[in-house]
Amino acid sequence: TRPPGARGVVVGMFISNSDRYPCCAPACCKYAPKFSKTQACYNVSVKSNGKHTKHLPKSKIAEAYGWLGSGMILTAYALLSLGILNGNSLMYHGIFFVGSSGLAVVTYRHRAYQSLLVNVFFTLLALTAMARIVYFS
């Protein structure tokens, strides 16, 4: 049986003196000779009782938006670094907004909360910068 509180896949092992035979369950003797009084069969828990975060099911649209976001952020930074775009332009902040929101969607779906926080902050920062450019310039 499993140890108290253990979760996950259980793999049985048949022990005969120093030989080990894998088996699917304690009563399985497919890979090993019959049990005797001196032989034992036990289970090993592969996963601990630790909390495991599950990802959301894969979505091709969300993954594509994440890849688009990565490309947009790299493009925006390259255009800024090469002097093609100005750091105060609406185009730069628009590209950065789309990119950071795409990465925010993907990091949320993968439950990477640290990256999600950074990307949400960058999304809000780009949105604020666009509003400043449109309404106050």
Image (tube, helix red, strand yellow):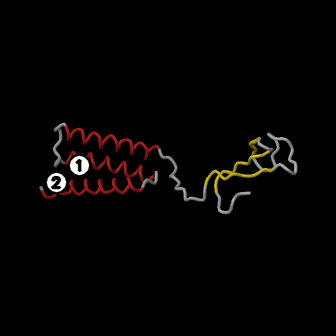
Dot placed on the residue nearer the N-terminal end, 1 or 2 = 1
Q: Residues within 10 Å of mark 2 (few under 14, many from 20)?
A: some
The residue that appears at 32% across and 46% down in the rendered structure is 99
- Spatial distance from mark 1 to mark 2, Cα to Cα? 10 Å
Q: Is residue 24 left or right of residue 90?
A: right
- The residue at which mark 1 appears reads as 93
Count of numbered labels shown in the rendering: 2
The residue that appears at 16% across and 49% down in the rendered structure is 88
Q: Is residue 74 above or below residue 105?
A: above
Where disc 2 sits, the SS reads: helix
Q: Is residue 78 left or right of residue 35?
A: left
Residue 85: name its quadrant: top left
- The kind of residue on which mark 1 rests is His
Q: Which quadrant of the rendered structure holds the N terminus?
A: bottom right
The residue that appears at 16% across and 38% down in the rendered structure is 83
- The kind of residue on which mark 2 rests is Ile
The residue that appears at 33% across and 56% down in the rendered structure is 120
Q: Estimate the x, y position of residue 62 in percent, counting from the top left.
A: 43, 47
Which label number is shown at residue 128? Answer: none
Where disc 1 sits, the SS reads: helix
Q: Is residue 137 above or below residue 76?
A: below
- The residue at which mark 2 appears reads as 133
Marks 1 and 2 close (CB-CB < 8 Å): yes
Q: Which quadrant of the rendered structure holds the C terminus?
A: bottom left
Q: Is residue 101 left or right of residue 19?
A: left
Q: Estimate the x, y position of residue 103 in percent, counting from the top left.
A: 37, 48
Q: Residue furthest bottom?
A: 4
Q: Residues within 10 Å of mark 1 (few under 14, many from 20)?
A: many
Q: Is residue 132 above or below residue 98?
A: below
Residue 74: name its quadrant: top left
Most foreground residue, 66 or 26 = 26
Q: Estimate the x, y position of residue 56 in percent, counting from the top left.
A: 50, 52
